[in-house]
Image: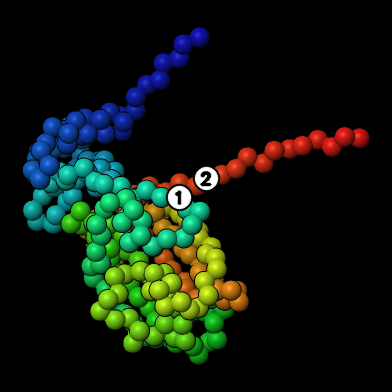
Amino acid sequence: MSMIYSTSTSQKLHERLGSIIAATHPGDKLPSEPDLARQLGVSRATLREAMRTFETQGIIRRRQGSGTFVMHPAQVIESGLEVLESIETLAERNGLPVSMGELKIEFRPANEEEILSMGLPSNLQVTHLSRVIQADGRPVAYLIDVIPEDILSPKEIGEEFTGSVLDLLIQRGSPDLVTSRCEINAVNATVGVARLLGIQRGDVLLCFKAYLYDSAGRVVDFSYSYFLPGYFRFHVVRRIEMMHSLDA
């Protein structure tokens, strides 16, 4: 028996918008939102929702006051999640140069979430690092790390720091890093994160909330990493658990 699947209005809009984008040369500007909305027969609000998908994939980029531009096809950083590696290491293996953008370093008392998540004394100071990672000439990730003061102080973050706390700790050789536990979620960009990544508030991002442990079982790094989905593709190799019956 054959089945016919109807194409939803949203799918049709994405297909038509995708065709317009594909027919526009990289670097060229798309028609203005009012013109594009009229051409597609939709409201500007509906058009913006459709454009978000293409923007988070790195296919288009909206610039405040200038318009929306078609980008060059984005190279994708692809990796398995079985081994913990920095963005810099992944990018180098994938042949995609990355660089660190805006960096902020704070030295402050741990807040309530950090105390609970890391099992810290209430009076302990932490080093809080937040920075933007760029690729293809645009921001593609926003990283936040919180490290106890006795593990990493602001003085130890020199000019050679490229954005990876993991690489810094590995190169230093201490503490003895063992495992990492990571929670992965799709989240909507807040106003602050959206500004740093050059996207719209509410756009969907991949968020990794991670805990890095040393050989003593202590959390030595508590981090949040926000990734633009169009620039990253993660996968996991999973094994099949075979059920064996036992002979009576």
Q: Place residue 197 in its image quadrant.
A: bottom left
- In the image, taking residue 31 as reference, residue 54 lies left or right, namely right
- Tell me the number on the disc at residue 80: 1
The three-letter amino acid code for the residue at tag 1 is: Gly
Which colour style is shown? rainbow
Q: From the image, which quarter does the C terminus lie in?
A: top right
Mark 1 Cα within 10 Å, few/some/many (few <14, many 20+)? few
Camera-side residue of 116 and 160: 160
The structure residue drawn at horizontal position 63% and vertical position 40%, both measured from the top left corner, is 240
From the viewer's perspective, is residue 117 above or below residue 88?
below
Q: Position of residue 45 (x, y in %)?
A: 23, 44
Can residue 191 be seen in this snapshot?
A: no
Q: Position of residue 241 (x, y in %)?
A: 67, 41
- Tell me the number on the disc at residue 159: none
Check the image and name the residue furthest to the right: 248
From the viewer's perspective, is residue 106 above or below residue 166?
below
Camera-side residue of 185 and 38: 185
**Total residue callouts:** 2
Could you tell me which secondary element the residue under label 1 belongs to?
Answer: strand
The structure residue drawn at horizontal position 35% and vertical position 84%, both measured from the top left corner, is 156
Could you tell me which secondary element the residue under label 2 belongs to?
Answer: loop
Q: In the rendered structure, are the residues bearing label 1 and label 2 in contact, judged by CB atoms less than 8 Å apart?
A: yes
Camera-side residue of 222 and 2: 222
The structure residue drawn at horizontal position 60% and vertical position 76%, both measured from the top left corner, is 216
- For label 2, the residue is 237
From the viewer's perspective, is residue 62 above or below residue 24?
below
Can residue 25 be seen in this snapshot?
A: yes
Task: Give whichever of discs 1 and 2 has the lower sequence position.
Answer: 1
- In the image, taking residue 33 as reference, residue 236 lies left or right, namely right
Q: Place residue 19 in its image quadrant.
A: top left
Q: Position of residue 229 (x, y in %)?
A: 34, 49
